[in-house]
Image: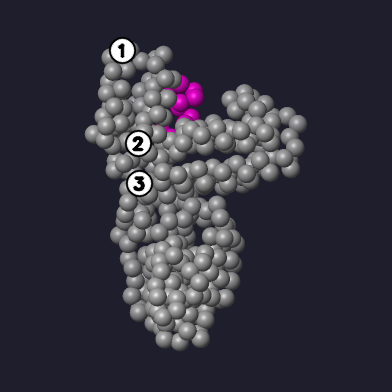
C-alpha cells in the first residue's frame, strides 16, 4: 500500500485534550473521513512552547496586521516571540507534509479572521494566529485550511485538490526534476488548471515559454530532453509552482468546470457514436444547470475512456485528482 500523504494539523482537532481549558475540539469529518487517506502530524504550539494544560488563555492584542499574543489576564506575559520561533522551526522540520489543517479562531493556530483586541478592548477580526502566521511565511506554497471552512463542500474540495497536486509536485522534485518531467507534469494538470481559469493556464505556459525551452511547445516537449540549463530549470520550476499553487486557490466554478467537460467532449467526439454523444452531453448539461453534481459527468467520461483510451485525456489528473472514495465531487 502506498504511503499516506502527511498533513500537519492542530492537535486539539484530533480529540487530544490540549486546549487551555483541558478540552479538545475533536472534528469527526477530519478524524473519520480524512483520517483514512492522510497521516496526521499533530502539533499544539502552545503546549510545545511550555504553556502546559490547563493554562491561562492567550489572545491577540495591538495592531491587527502584526498582533502580539499575550496572556488575557496578564498582557505583560507576551508569548509572540516563542510562538513565532516555534512556527518557523516547525515549518522547516515538517518539510515533507503536503498540507496543514489549522484550528480556526485560535490566537496561535488561526489562519485568518482571528479576534485582535485593540485600545479600549475594541475588537477586530483581521488577525492571524502567531504560530500559523510564522509557519505559513516560512512555507508559503503549502496548502492550508481551517477546519470550519472544510464544512463548505467547495472549499473542502479545493483544499484536498491542492494537497494532492502539491504532493505530486513534492514527489516530482524529490525524484529529480528535468525539463521533460516538468513539462509532463504541466500537461497532466492542464485541464485541472483550466477549471480554475483558462487565463491562468495560459499564464503558466507563457511563464515556461519565456524562461525555459521545456515549455516552448508543451506537447512536443514531452519528446525532448537536451541541453538542460540546471539554473534556468530551477528558476522556472520555482516560478511555476508558485503560480500554480496561487492559481489553484481560485475557485473552480460550475461554468469553468463545464468548459473543461466540453473540452473533453471535443477530444472524445472522434470516438463516440451519436447516441453516446447525446448521452454524455445530457449529463454535462444537467451539471451545467445545477441538476447534477460534478461527480456524474466525470464518472461517465471516465467510463467512456475505459473503451476509448485517448492518450491526452487519459493522463489528465482532472478526471481523478484524489481518491473517488472521498466523494468530494458529489457535493459540488
Ligand atoms: S488551537 Fe492550536 S494552540 Fe490551541 S489547543 Fe489547538 S493546537 Fe493547541
Number of dots carrying numbers: 3
Q: Residue at x 36, y 30 (%)?
A: 258
Q: Earlier in the sequence, mark 1 or mark 3?
A: 3
- Residue to which mark 1 is pinned: 274
Q: Is residue 44 visible?
A: no
Q: CA distance from mark 3 to mark 2?
A: 11 Å
Residue range highlighted in magenta: 309-319
Residue 254's disc number: 2
Residue 41 on image: x %, y %: 47, 62
Report the mark closest to the observer, 3 or 2: 2
Nearer the observer, 133 or 218: 133
User: Ligand 1: does it lie within 8 Å of the C-beta at label 3?
Assistant: no
Q: Are dots 1 and 2 in contact, CB under 8 Å?
A: no
Q: Colour scheme in the image?
A: one colour
- Residue to which mark 3 is pinned: 154
The verdict on residue 213 being magenta is no
Amino acid at each position: 500500500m502506498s504511503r499516506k500523504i502527511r498533513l500537519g494539523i492542530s492537535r486539539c482537532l484530533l480529540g487530544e485534550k490540549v486546549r487551555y481549558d483541558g478540552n479538545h475540539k475533536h472534528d469527526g469529518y477530519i478524524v473519520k473521513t480524512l483520517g483514512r487517506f492522510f497521516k496526521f502530524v499533530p502539533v499544539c504550539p502552545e503546549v510545545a512552547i511550555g504553556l502546559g494544560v490547563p493554562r491561562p488563555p492567550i489572545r491577540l492584542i495591538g495592531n491587527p496586521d502584526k498582533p502580539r499574543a499575550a496572556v488575557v489576564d496578564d498582557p505583560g506575559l507576551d508569548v509572540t516571540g516563542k510562538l513565532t520561533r516555534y512556527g518557523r522551526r516547525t515549518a522547516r522540520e515538517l518539510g515533507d507534509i503536503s498540507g496543514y489543517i489549522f484550528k480556526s479562531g485560535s490566537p496561535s493556530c488561526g489562519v485568518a479572521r482571528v479576534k485582535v483586541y485593540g485600545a479600549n478592548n475594541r475588537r477586530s477580526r483581521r488577525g492571524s494566529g502567531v504560530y500559523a502566521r510564522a509557519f505559513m511565511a516560512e512555507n508559503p506554497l503549502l496548502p492550508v485550511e481551517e477546519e470550519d471552512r472544510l464544512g463548505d463542500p467547495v472549499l473542502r474540495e479545493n483544499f484536498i485538490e491542492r494537497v494532492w497536486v502539491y504532493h505530486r509536485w513534492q514527489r516530482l522534485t524529490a525524484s529529480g526534476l528535468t525539463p521533460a518531467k516538468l513539462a509532463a507534469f504541466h500537461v497532466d494538470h492542464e485541464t485541472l488548471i483550466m477549471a480554475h481559469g483558462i487565463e491562468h493556464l495560459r499564464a503558466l505556459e507563457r511563464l515556461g515559454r519565456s524562461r525555459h525551452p521545456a515549455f516552448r511547445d508543451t506537447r512536443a516537449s514531452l519528446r525532448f530532453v537536451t541541453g538542460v540549463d540546471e539554473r534556468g530549470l530551477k528558476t522556472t520550476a520555482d516560478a511555476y509552482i508558485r503560480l500554480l499553487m496561487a492559481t489553484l486557490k481560485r475557485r473552480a466554478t460550475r461554468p469553468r468546470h463545464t468548459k473543461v467537460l466540453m473540452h473533453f467532449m471535443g477530444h472524445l467526439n472522434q470516438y463516440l457514436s451519436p447516441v453516446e454523444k447525446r448521452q454524455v452531453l445530457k449529463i454535462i448539461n444537467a451539471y451545467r444547470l445545477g441538476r447534477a453534481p460534478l461527480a456524474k459527468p466525470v464518472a461517465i467520461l471516465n467510463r467512456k475512456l475505459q473503451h476509448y483510451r485517448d492518450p491526452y485525456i487519459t493522463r489528465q489528473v482532472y478526471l481523478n485528482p484524489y481518491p473517488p472514495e472521498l466523494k468530494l465531487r458529489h457535493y459540488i
